[in-house]
Amino acid sequence: MTTTDIAREESGGRRLSDLDDAALAEKAKTERAAFDMLYRRYARRVYGYCYSRTGNGQVAEDLTAQTFLRGTGGDRPLPG
């Protein structure tokens, strides 16, 4: 089974790439594949914004991580 097959199965037969951002963000709270796709879609933009505001790469990395964790209920681990 490929990663795409797993993602499709976890999303009730729909491809994760077909989901809008709101639906993908909701699935990312419980599904690792959805979180990974959301991260791939937005990590560079979030990092770029954080870096533009702070001018510090390490701080921008930390803020990017915090953004994704908070956005997906980061108080609990994602399924493996």
Image (spheres, rainbow, N blue to C red):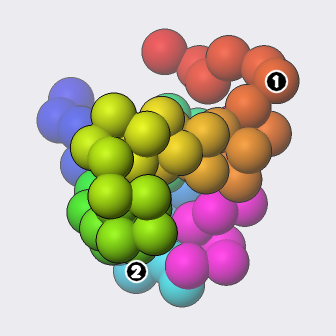
Question: Tag 2's secondary structure?
Answer: helix
Residue appearing at x 43%, y 39% in the figure: 59
Q: Nearer the viewer, mark 1 or mark 2?
A: 1
User: In the image, which residues are magenta?
Assistant: 21-30
| Real-space CA distance between mark 1 and mark 2, rounded to the nearest whole angstrom | 27 Å
Residue placed under numbered mark 1 in the picture: 75
Question: Above or below — where is 13 with respect to 9?
Answer: below
Where does residue 48 sit, x and y in percent of width and height? 30, 67
Number of numbered discs overlaid on the protein picture:
2
Q: Does residue 20 show up?
A: yes
Main SS of residues in magenta: helix
Q: Nearer the viewer, residue 66 or 59?
A: 59
Residue at point 17%, 35% (across, down) = 2
Q: Residues within 10 Å of mark 2 (few under 14, many from 20)?
A: few
Residue depicted at x 54% and y 84%: 20
Work out whether residue 24 or residue 53 is closer to the camera in this orientation and state it: 53
- Tell me, yes or no, whether the highlighted magenta stretch contains residue 42: no
Q: Nearer the viewer, residue 74 or 19?
A: 74
Q: Position of residue 29 (x, y in %)?
A: 71, 44
Residue 33: in sight, yes or no? no
Could you say whether the residue bearing mark 1 is in a helix, strand or loop?
A: loop
Give the residue type at disc 1.
Asp
Instruction: Please state which amino acid type lies under the numbered disc 2.
Output: Asp
Which quadrant does the N terminus fall into?
Answer: top left
Q: Are marks 1 and 2 in contact (CB under 8 Å)?
A: no
Tell me the residue at 61%/24% (across/down): 78
Q: Which residue is mark 2?
A: 18
Q: Which circle marks residue 34 in the picture?
A: none
